[in-house]
Image (spheres, rainbow, N blue to C red):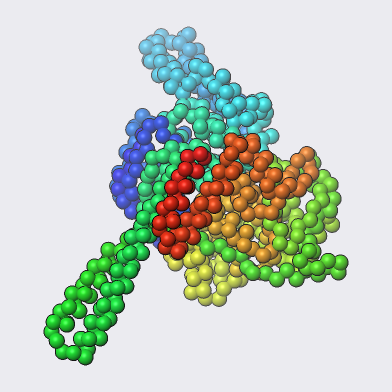
């Protein structure tokens, strides 16, 4: 379907690709993954509009290939005053109207031949996109996505998540040869994410999907393309097998590297001894031996293993160590709530939340969950603003906010350097050193924030928070746009943080891995639920009954393998890897 050969492309301040090649075969469902800012969306744009770019290499696409595209940002069409069915059927109706116009012209035309030819071409185009039974196909796709009752609803009445699924259906329904989607899962709640999974798995054509969502990665794809550090590799198989393949490679290479380093160290010691001897004893043979040993050492160091896809770039997110000095006459600082919400209500055109009550403790890690459009972000913003009588934040509590609207917390006209010089650091070297831990290279400092990827902007928001002294973090979809490895780093940072966290998230991997309990929005109010009960509820709805137990085994084995590698116990690591392979097969 697509063949990319030795493609290289650079921005003025950044090399994106260095002689990358891959093939996308007909019928494959391919996940396109990689760290934030590596150029995944740019590569998609080059494939779709190659004439707009100056690049080296070849992009070979069949000229007859029809491409459907779903952007991560296209929400403006939601304002159209038409029904869901009519929106999806627009292309079919357009072609039908064209055929009717041709028939009308035939009634009075003296020369029918050109009109008959046009009619046949139009009819062929209608058949190519599945026009003969498009109405039933639309109904069927809406059912697959769990939106069967929305067929006659107006677009303007849909939530953002519902409209995203409608856009996916609209692209699928015309039977393109290839569908490209750029993070279609961003901000989808659990039910809509499951609908997207069903749509992807029911589609018979070729797909190329940029995604960081672990649920989709584990259940939707049979090919992986991984872009990392200007280089690319492709893997035929599932994401879980790809990760296992990386882990096996890491064990093998680390064993080689350990042996290499031991050999290099042995030769360094020998060079030092020979150099010492040559200093005190004049003997040409000693000098020759020294030179030979130095040459051998140089060759050993030059041949050291380089494995760019084994040590994946992962940010080191570390929230500040905070002092929970909360003033409350009736309670100790340890037990005092940092946040109280009492009889909170909010409404726009209709009531979203009413008579909501809950407390957050000084060290609680809490997820606020619920369907799209139920008032989660509004509540979080009201807590951050702290201007309502129904919201009480304890004295001594400093809040920090990560916004879905990244330009709200970042000045996008700033460079990265400007953003951190204004309030957090004094020198460029301090900023460079600090941001290096988050994966930002020196050349990135002079880039405008507006030019960064969505994942990079989220990492910058997190970096700003980590440089402060907040002891209550309000995080609105913090994993959105983050690559998989950055999501894991964020989960670890939240789990280790000694302050309080209230986080909106639709990523149930993140919720299950790092929160103490959830606040679930149901019927315009909020109820507290343990993480264990939440995990059981989610897994029962979407997975086999043993999935949760096997996921836990998988995580425990991966942790044990990491410890074994740290201790250079390669025999144990390989044994545990065999156990992990058996668990992966169950998943």
Q: Is residue 272 left or right of residue 46?
A: left
Q: Position of residue 482 (x, y in %)?
A: 54, 52
The number of discs equals: 0
Q: Nearer the viewer, residue 458 or 448?
A: 458
Can residue 431 be seen here? The reply is yes
Question: Residue at horizontal 46%, vertical 28%?
Answer: 204
Q: Position of residue 582 (x, y in %)?
A: 47, 43
Question: Residue at horizontal 41%, vertical 34%?
Answer: 28
Q: Residue furthest right?
A: 330
Q: Is residue 255 left or right of residue 299?
A: right
In the depicted structure, whether residue 577 falls above or below residue 275: above
Question: Residue at horizontal 45%, vertical 11%?
Answer: 106
Q: Nearer the viewer, residue 458 or 52?
A: 458
Which of the 4 quarters of the picture holds residue 381? bottom right
Can residue 101 be seen here? The reply is no
Q: Residue furthest bottom?
A: 280
Q: Position of residue 80 (x, y in %)?
A: 62, 33
Which of the 4 quarters of the picture holds residue 63? top left
In the depicted structure, whether residue 453 falls above or below residue 182: below
In the depicted structure, whether residue 298 falls above or below residue 346: below
Question: Residue at horizontal 64%, vertical 33%?
Answer: 155
Q: Position of residue 205 (x, y in %)?
A: 44, 30
């Amino acid at each position: 379907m697509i063949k990319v050969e030795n493609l290289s492309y650079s921005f003025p301040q950044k090399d994106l690709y260095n002689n990358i090649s891959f093939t996308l075969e007909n019928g494959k469902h391919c996940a396109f993954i990689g760290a934030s800012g590596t150029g995944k969306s740019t590569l998609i744009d080059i494939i779709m509009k190659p004439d707009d770019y100056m690049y080296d290499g070849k992009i070979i696409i069949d000229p007859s290939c029809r491409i459907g595209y779903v952007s991560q940002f296209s929400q403006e069409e939601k304002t159209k005053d038409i029904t869901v069915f009519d929106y999806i059927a627009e292309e079919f109706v357009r072609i039908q109207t064209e055929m009717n116009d041709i028939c009308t012209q035939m009634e009075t035309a003296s020369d029918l031949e050109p009109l008959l030819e046009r009619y046949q071409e139009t009819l062929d185009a209608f058949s190519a996109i599945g026009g003969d039974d498009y109405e039933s196909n639309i109904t069927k796709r809406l059912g697959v996505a769990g939106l069967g009752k929305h067929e006659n609803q107006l677009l303007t009445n849909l939530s953002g998540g519902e409209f995203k699924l409608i856009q996916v259906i609209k692209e699928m329904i015309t039977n393109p040869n290839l569908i490209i989607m750029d993070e279609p899962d961003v901000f989808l709640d659990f039910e809509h994410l499951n609908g997207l999974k069903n749509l992807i798995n029911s589609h018979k054509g070729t797909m190329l999907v940029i995604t960081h969502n672990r649920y989709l990665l584990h259940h939707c794809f049979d090919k992986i393309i991984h872009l990392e550090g200007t280089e690319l590799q492709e893997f035929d198989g599932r994401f879980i097998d790809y990760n296992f393949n990386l882990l096996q490679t890491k064990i093998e290479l680390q064993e080689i590297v350990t042996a290499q380093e031991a050999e290099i160290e042995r030769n360094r010691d020998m060079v030092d001894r020979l150099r010492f001897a040559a200093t005190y004893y004049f003997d040409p043979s000693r000098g020759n031996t020294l030179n030979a040993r130095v040459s051998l050492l140089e060759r050993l160091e030059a041949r050291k293993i380089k494995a760019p896809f084994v040590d994946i770039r992962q940010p080191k997110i570390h929230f500040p160590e905070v002092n929970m000095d909360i003033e409350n006459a009736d309670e100790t600082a340890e037990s005092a709530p940092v946040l109280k919400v009492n009889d909170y209500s909010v409404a726009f055109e209709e009531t979203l939340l009413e008579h909501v009550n809950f407390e957050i403790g000084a060290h609680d890690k809490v997820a606020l969950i619920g369907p799209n459009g139920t008032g989660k972000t509004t509540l979080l913003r009201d807590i951050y603003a702290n201007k309502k009588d129904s919201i009480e934040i304890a004295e001594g509590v400093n809040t920090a906010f990560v916004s879905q609207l990244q330009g709200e917390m970042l000045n996008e006209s700033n460079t990265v350097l400007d953003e951190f010089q204004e309030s957090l650091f004094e020198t460029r070297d301090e900023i460079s050193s600090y941001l290096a831990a988050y994966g930002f290279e020196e050349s990135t400092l002079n880039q405008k924030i507006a030019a960064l990827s969505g994942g990079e902007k989220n990492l910058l928001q997190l970096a700003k928070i980590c440089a402060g002294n907040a002891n209550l973090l309000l995080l609105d979809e913090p994993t959105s746009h983050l690559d998989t490895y950055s999501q894991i780093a964020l989960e670890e940072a939240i789990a280790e943080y000694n302050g309080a966290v209230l986080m909106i998230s639709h990523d149930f991997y993140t919720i299950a891995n790092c929160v103490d309990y959830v606040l679930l929005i149901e019927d315009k109010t909020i109820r507290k639920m343990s993480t264990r009960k939440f995990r059981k509820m989610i897994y029962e709805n979407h997975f086999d009954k043993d999935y949760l137990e096997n996921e836990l085994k998988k995580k425990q084995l991966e942790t044990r393998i990491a410890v074994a590698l740290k201790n250079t116990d390669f025999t144990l690591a390989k044994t545990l890897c065999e156990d992990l392979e058996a668990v992966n097969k169950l998943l």
